[in-house]
Amino acid sequence: MGEPKRDNAAPPSPPSRQAISKALLADEGPLVESLIERASLSADDRRQIERLASDLVKAAREGRHEQGGIDSFLHEYGLSSEEGVLLLCLAEALLRVPDAATADRLIAGTIGSGDWGRHLGHSDSLLVNASTWGLMLTG
């Protein structure tokens, strides 16, 4: 079945961008079989994951009402704005980019087409305003 229970072991590190790119071009059958083998979890592992996920969701819901954070950013750059749509499209496209140079060109082309200045000062959040300045300077 799954791996034996690991007490106090560090979680496995995520795959490198190079490994992800290699897997993208791999033969699907053997790749899927190896992923299924690696994804097998014991009942105890599943309980721990469920407990952690539940704790994370509760913490996120409690923190939503605080000023700032990612909710403020999402409020300012929602899908009702052209810039919010640009950021969403950029995030989705970056998942499929094969290398850093292409990613850099994609970011430059996308960020350069937004009117980021119109968002400056609309939010009380330091994160949102600092991000807006960064987007303006990048664009």
Image: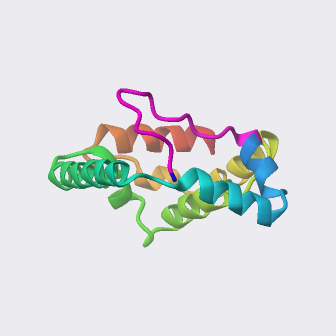
- In the rendered image, residue 56, in percent from the top left (x then y), is placed at 26, 49
Q: Position of residue 122 (x, y in %)?
A: 32, 52
Q: Position of residue 7 (x, y in %)?
A: 36, 30
Which residue is more in the foreground, 62 or 48? Answer: 48
Q: Residue 62 colored magenta?
A: no
Determine the image quadrant of residue 88.
bottom right
Q: Is residue 69 left or right of residue 13?
A: left
Side of 7 where 34 appears, left or right:
right
What secondary structure predominates along the stretch shown in magenta?
loop
Bounds of the magenta segment: 2-18
- The reply to whether residue 98 is visible in this rendering is no
Q: Residue at x 61, y 59 (%)?
A: 36
Q: Is 13 left, or right, of 32 in this rendering?
A: left
Residue for point 77% across, 52% down: 23
Does residue 3 appear in this view?
yes
| Image quarter in which the C terminus is found | top right
Report x, y in % for residue 45. 36, 48
Q: How is the image coloured?
A: rainbow
At x 61% / y 61%, what residue is drawn?
92
